Amino acid sequence: MTQPKLRLGMVGGGQGAFIGAIHRMAARLDDRFTLMAGAFSSDPARAEASGATLGIDPARSYASFATMATAEAARADGIDAVAIVTPNHLHAPAATAFLTAGIHVICDKPLAHRLEDAERLVETTLRSDRLLLVTYNYSGYAMVRYARALVAAGVLGDLRISQTEYAQEWLNQPLEQSGHKQAAWRTDPTQAGLGGCLGDIGTHAFHLTEFVTGQRVEALAADLSTFGPGRILDDNAHILLRFAGGARGMLWASQVAPGQKNGLRLRLYGTLGGLEWHQENPDALDVTLFGQPTQRLTRGGPTLPGLDIPAPPSRLPAGHPEGYLEGFATLYSDAADAILAHRAGERSVSTVLPTVADGVRGLRFIQTAVTSAQQDTLWLAL
Amino acid sequence: MTQPKLRLGMVGGGQGAFIGAIHRMAARLDDRFTLMAGAFSSDPARAEASGATLGIDPARSYASFATMATAEAARADGIDAVAIVTPNHLHAPAATAFLTAGIHVICDKPLAHRLEDAERLVETTLRSDRLLLVTYNYSGYAMVRYARALVAAGVLGDLRISQTEYAQEWLNQPLEQSGHKQAAWRTDPTQAGLGGCLGDIGTHAFHLTEFVTGQRVEALAADLSTFGPGRILDDNAHILLRFAGGARGMLWASQVAPGQKNGLRLRLYGTLGGLEWHQENPDALDVTLFGQPTQRLTRGGPTLPGLDIPAPPSRLPAGHPEGYLEGFATLYSDAADAILAHRAGERSVSTVLPTVADGVRGLRFIQTAVTSAQQDTLWLAL
Amino acid sequence: MTQPKLRLGMVGGGQGAFIGAIHRMAARLDDRFTLMAGAFSSDPARAEASGATLGIDPARSYASFATMATAEAARADGIDAVAIVTPNHLHAPAATAFLTAGIHVICDKPLAHRLEDAERLVETTLRSDRLLLVTYNYSGYAMVRYARALVAAGVLGDLRISQTEYAQEWLNQPLEQSGHKQAAWRTDPTQAGLGGCLGDIGTHAFHLTEFVTGQRVEALAADLSTFGPGRILDDNAHILLRFAGGARGMLWASQVAPGQKNGLRLRLYGTLGGLEWHQENPDALDVTLFGQPTQRLTRGGPTLPGLDIPAPPSRLPAGHPEGYLEGFATLYSDAADAILAHRAGERSVSTVLPTVADGVRGLRFIQTAVTSAQQDTLWLAL
Amino acid sequence: MTQPKLRLGMVGGGQGAFIGAIHRMAARLDDRFTLMAGAFSSDPARAEASGATLGIDPARSYASFATMATAEAARADGIDAVAIVTPNHLHAPAATAFLTAGIHVICDKPLAHRLEDAERLVETTLRSDRLLLVTYNYSGYAMVRYARALVAAGVLGDLRISQTEYAQEWLNQPLEQSGHKQAAWRTDPTQAGLGGCLGDIGTHAFHLTEFVTGQRVEALAADLSTFGPGRILDDNAHILLRFAGGARGMLWASQVAPGQKNGLRLRLYGTLGGLEWHQENPDALDVTLFGQPTQRLTRGGPTLPGLDIPAPPSRLPAGHPEGYLEGFATLYSDAADAILAHRAGERSVSTVLPTVADGVRGLRFIQTAVTSAQQDTLWLAL
């Protein structure tokens, strides 16, 4: 049976943007959404030009997200959901506008600029009876989902150690001083928030850690650095973690690590086994049951023998690599399912889909890390 | 400036098919095509059901490709191009129907069932003044394109050795005897043609070899095996190659190699350097200039220092993996460019885009290998 | 010209021991030492049996190291040097005995049981006018030496980040409770000292970090865990580092990480580049000059173009793997050189050879980490 | 109980030689042999100087192997075995001299210069009642031994496909024209024999293939190339194989492949599974049981669950890499065992130890490949 296609709007993502184009490809891949409307830039001329390039009906290419929310809510064929892909400081106001207008929101991470903004969105979301989803896209990778299921099934035993890292090189030089738009807003506290590297990629690493372990980090102790000359926000974060269940961990995030492209890695060790996953080779998951050889699991390939864990989402046979866009697209397809279920009256959301609660958690992570670092790596509850 | 979206039709690719869904995702990814019509199965009921599932206007969901070609050619809003994704024996008749109707054709490989059918398509294509493109999709990978450019620029010096392999495991057991649709037609000479593994994956390996080296294989000597019990066509091919320029090579294709998922690899060695590429990690290309350390080039990352070779096509920054669908989508985007250029009067096609000539070459490869193997690995010109 | 072979003695390393056999193979590999005498066990019967198995003249197979030091010093053909390979608590007394007797000492790490014992050895060594070398054997690997030279030459620019880890799995279960001799003494504070995992492998990781960076860690903050049931000492250490030059680092050591065999890794990042080395593939060193592709350097292979850094020590051509024993043997060969130079009047020691100062540094690392952990991860100077 | 040390002599291996030093380190590593005598060069002055450097008693440093064989046989403390490490054309005469003198022979590969010389050694060996062992040293690697045991135990089912390759880069340029001693004799038919790359490394690849599969190659078809300008012998070999048991294979050997250091790899595929081993990472063996994830076995680590195959020889725990010298040393230790067993009356030799029969097989491989290539890749029995 054919599934109805959903109507999608977008805030941000105009010319010169990065993540907007990715959201559009991700939304398109599984054919669950059609992009119908947008406020693609806070600059009206750029917004209009971007809409035209994207083939959007000019009547639905708006100069501001506020106008867009009102206008789309009023249309019979108005959008079902909006993707918010602006710099961080606009996430909360835009999300609020659309939720209040009764439109589901798919928001890029971090959910907001400041923790209090994120927290306010919990109440706003609840009141709106709409979905607020956050694109912690790495949780959409098939083998990340499978890793989470393995841990939940007890394959690793009791978790003891978590080692997460997310390292990049691209801010190794102060690009923000030479007009690089992506670098500029990410290193500007008024647009990015309290965290630099922490907010941009640290939140991904933190979400991945809690997502796969299925456990809450209950305290952290952070040492933050700012290596780029003239930079205000952190560009390197060294963080120790303590989990509610007794496990200990490390989290390293950096944007000044030459040789590291997009090095998000997770390694977990428990009483019975360990696992290792690396974003740059996302279809693979190495699992060791203590006392046995390491097994390399592959998306689409054989799963761990003797266990009854369903295979993770997969579009292609093993050996035909799925990549970043496919993982991202899985979140969009999950969002489509969730929106259709909501329409049918369902009010609980799939446990694998990051919601406003995860968004708040990300902001709390940033704020706690910054505070800990200011107090000389003090352990703080989270 | 916005590019016009093209209207796409499809022949084959209904329920239970594999490659059709991939063509649809690939065509959709870069937003250059909209699927408008189809003859999704030779079984009318399945064709209709498939069209409905895909959200195709029932009036444009046809029971046969012949009807479809005529009807679409007659519509003002008829399709610009058709994707042919049937079993091999239907490629040539379907392509002929659409070309004759004045519709561009994007055909899966191998181009035809038999060499003579492929050869006839050369004339048909010429007469039609339409494009016939063949989806040797692995040539769409960014680093494959870059490898080709490196070789063309003389970075390896004079080519001496080519080692190509394409190994899979999925036909290790005789799936075709237990109702596996994909296995069934691929092992059936009446649908697949002369080659089993040769046609299904050997042609990819052969195309990749000539594509990257930029050289013609002028002779081959083959040893073909059929290991699967009850199987008629080859499921393992060992082939020696001689190139026009004096290089020598090996090509191994197998579908009975446990542990190999989709192991397409190319290694080239010349007087000045060597390179290595592996489809399961497609964003990487290892290049060695003799006397220097091996350099790992990455899609989106730094290119080889001191050379003025343009970076290959790329949607994402380095470290954000692009996979099989992205490589395939590049062919579709190239096809869209070629169709628009054709509409504008251009009659030559980008040299990286596989056309009917490449399709014929693939069939000649299959037939020559089969003949050589029948004559005890005799060297035969190609 | 042929080099005189040196006469070696050994304390510890009898039947059931692990590291003694390794020292013997390492000492033998480059033919610079002949094992002539030993006190192979604190158990006289086992000492005698071990000496016999090793083909040692019974007159020179001693029941105690004290007797051995006196007797060997009195012989005209007495040993030139002694290797001390006992559990940690015997290192200092044995080293003292031999130094005092005028015999050079090659001591396994950590140098002593407690920091104060190590510190006392500084004075003892000075007074003795003999060499006290410590087998931080990982610093003998060719590519570790080369990495150190690269950093010293400024190839990475100013160091910003250091990520060191040393992870094993072998103490994942409480082997010490089932009669495993190696596990027993390493987890027993009276034999091992203050550190468990810290002393056994953390000291290696720490030495490697300072050795390759050429910088002192000036402060650390530690979180230590003891996961093994009934265990007293740490079996997992999470440590933050601050370097004198402004760099920041992480050091992770663990013996309860299933899947990790002997996972000692070092990654360094500076303003101009980064490098990565992994002990389980010791012949390789990945170096990235920011803005260029990553280069894989190989022992015996081409070095970094454009730099005048001498190739590291190497016995075999590239691609013929050297392993753990070869790295260890390099320390022994360096020791032989140092002893011969000492004999010729030279009193300074090669900067790459770990001496008593490095040994003290290792103990200070252990004690500081333990103290920091007891004070809730307080930053402490080192 | 202590094992008696054996007395070793050496023919060849003087100053400027490569493989001699390796044999000496390998013989020394496990302390089973003492080098006592030698005829280290065919140049008397160099022979004498080499002996002095090696610390050999001048009375036992001979100017010719013939003198040495006679003299050592006459001594009460004469050598037990001789290592022959000359260029190929001297292997057979030297081996004959020592066997005839009643001294066991450990000969480098290939066993002789020409097949007929190798065949004559079968009779000579038999008559001598002494051992003639051939150092196909790659068969000494632990995981190669384990792979052989897995195949013998039926873990892969019936063998279908064998892919062996041995690729190097070092003869990419004509080093033999600029006084490179190693290159000079290896490319000179009067010293090397019929095969260039074939003899130097192809024989290793061939032995490894038959050793691990436990099957005889019954026919081959070869395409040989000589790329180096002015070179006479092959420097690249492409060979198709047919096994007695019905399997098919490819063997590629090359010394002109830039980027390849010492790339000896073996991959086997059978009805039930596949395996992969690579000499540059010799402690690992990847095994796939069809339908299960690939398992990475590690020397010293867990073996394949559910099978009762003894762990292979190992000196070090998992993760502490053993390399080329350790694999080579295993052959020497096996040789020591065999010599002691022979002394005790045993006349059969361990099946894993390469003997004169393997040596003959290697020469037959070279000659058959050369003949096949001369007849345009004709299949020839072997």
Image: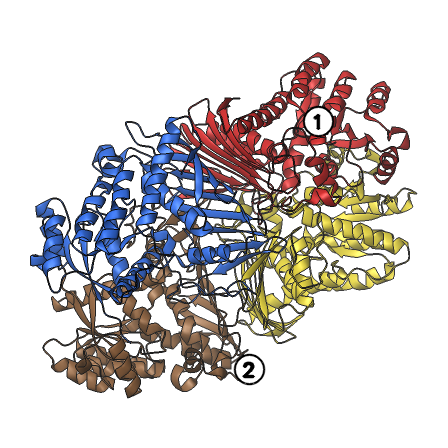
Chain colours: A red, B yellow, C blue, D brown
State whether residue A356 is above or below residue D310: above
Q: Is there any visible trace of residue D135 in the rendered image? A: no
Q: Is there any visible trace of residue A5 in the rendered image? A: yes
State whether residue D321 is above or below residue C195: below
**Any mark on residue C137, and which?**
none
Subunit that carries the residue with mark 1 = A
Give the x, y percent position of residue C122: 28, 47
Could you tell me which secondary element the residue under label 1 belongs to? Answer: strand
Question: What type is the residue that disc 1 sits on?
Answer: Ile
The residue wearing badge 2 is D229
The residue wearing badge 1 is A106
Inter-mark Cα distance, 2 to 1: 65 Å
Quadrant of the snapshot with the N terminus of chain D: bottom left
State whether residue D264 is above or below residue B62: below
Spot the residue most to the top: A127
Residue plotted at (85% across, 23% down): A67
Q: Residues within 10 Å of mark 2 (few under 14, many from 20)?
A: few
Quick check: marks 2 and 1 in contact, CB under 8 Å? Answer: no
- Locate residue B86 relative to residue C313 in the image: left or right: right
Subunit that carries the residue with mark 2 = D
State whether residue C69 is above or below residue D56: above
Residue A79: name its quadrant: top right
- Locate residue C138 relative to residue B269 in the image: left or right: left
Question: What type is the residue that disc 2 sits on?
Answer: Pro
Q: Nearer the viewer, residue C181 or B142?
A: C181
Residue plotted at (25% across, 43% down): C120
Q: Residues within 10 Å of mark 1 (few under 14, many from 20)?
A: many
Q: How many marks?
A: 2
Q: Nearer the viewer, residue A6 or C309?
A: C309
Q: Are marks 2 and 1 on the same chain?
A: no
Give the x, y percent position of residue C269: 54, 47
Give the x, y percent position of residue C377: 43, 29
